[in-house]
Amino acid sequence: MAEKACLNKTKQYSWVNKPPFFYGWVIMAAGTFGLIMTSPGQTYTVSIFIENIIKDLGISRSLVSTLYSIGTLIGSFSLPFWGRMVDQKGTRKMVVLISILFGLACIYMGMVKNAFMLGIGFILVRMLGQGSLGLISQTAINQWWIRKRGMVIGISGLLTALLGMGAFPSLVYALISAFEWRVAYAILGLVLLLLMAPVGFFLFRNQPEDYHLLPDGDVDVPSTAINKSTEPDLIEENWTLKEAIRTKTFWMLAISLSLFSMLSTGLFFHLVSIFENRSLNPSVAASVFLPVAFAAALTQFTAGFLTDRIPLRYLLAIGLLLQAAALLSAQVLQGTITAFLFGIVLGATNGISRATGAVAWPKFFGRKHLGSIYGFTTAVAIIGAALGPLPFGIAYDILGTYQPVLLISAGVCILFSIASLTIQKPKRKTIAVN
């Protein structure tokens, strides 16, 4: 009976082993598609709908902004739960479930009639899109790669930035122009239901070990080989979330990566106002998203490759210095050229932070409990993003200028850049026995 079950299991999994290439490449493609399909829940896409929502529902901009921040916060609180579910149920089951729920949430967004319904919609699209679908897709990719993880994350990041932030806003704008905003949201929901959910079911798979494979395609290597590696970065040590949060490395990474999320969101949210304060037309602010997207794509691609070759602390330090440079340069914008340079620096910051964040957690804390760790850290980052616009707005309302918060934020980034150079791969404490 046991032999028969084993044969059935081998037959069930055999097609994953049949391609002449490592199935991890399929996972990379499917996971990247998942990351791109988080776009309906990302700020760069939601922002395209905002003007239509304000006009159609007859509510104020400040109320929409408040609902969006509250929706982002509430949605982020569920991510540790979804992360645990990924560890328990696997990426395949969870990506199908989340894709269906996210698709229904987008269809719901096309039916909102008032501020209360809009607030519920924001909670759903932020929780399921920006949070959960991204968490699962990134976890799936990381489960299949270790030695080549940085390279794979770089390729995935390049495609995600170009086809997500780079192309999705224009696609959504075209849909709204051709139909109207409610129909556009419904179309996005149908794409998730009819494309993303099947991709999850047919292509996503949990871990290579489930199919008698090892990460990176080391099919014939014994299961213990990776732990015999003489390269410290390839020795995988699995930490639970409770163990990880007791380390200095965990919190240095979590706070540093949240700074990227918080400050970049603050800059994006108030970008038009910041530009107007420098006598720049709002159309210039809109055009800056293009260099941001291209810089983010190229930088994440490059940084992904570098994560396999240099310590992550150096990339993190460089990223934080670039974040400080973006904050400082926002005070001296003079024309379109300087605005585009500002966008390039901000995009490079985004690319480095994404590459570093994607690689750091599995590299330092292993793959076994990666869903739980991603769930917690993604929640922290999203909370930072939700709070990011507040200090900028408060400073401008009270002082009539963004300069103080820009200077203080830049100083904090520089301090954390220096501190991040102390980050090391954590080691479990051992107790000597006499």
Image (spheres, grey):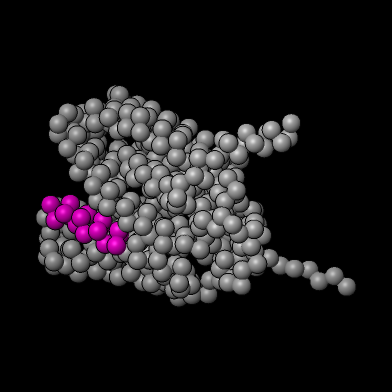
Residue sitting at x 35%, y 33%: 195
Magenta residues: mostly which secondary structure? Answer: helix
Location of the C terminus by quadrant is: bottom right
Answer whether residue 162 is visible to the viewer in this image.
Answer: yes
In this picture, residue 284 sits left or right of residue 246: left
Q: Nearer the viewer, residue 158 or 199?
A: 199
Q: Nearer the viewer, residue 55 or 30?
A: 30
Counting from the top left corner in percent of width and height, residue 112 is at: 31, 26
In this picture, residue 404 sits left or right of residue 52: right
Answer whether residue 398 is visible to the viewer in this image.
Answer: no
Counting from the top left corner in percent of width and height, residue 431 is at: 78, 68
In this picture, residue 228 sits left or right of residue 411: right
Q: Is 177 rendered above or below residue 257?
A: above
In this picture, residue 27 sits left or right of residue 338: right
Location of the N terminus by quadrant is: top right
Is 194 magenta? The answer is: no
Q: Start and end of the magenta stretch?
A: 283-298
Is 296 magenta? The answer is: yes
Residue sitting at x 49%, y 44%: 18
Counting from the top left corner in percent of width and height, residue 207 is at: 56, 47
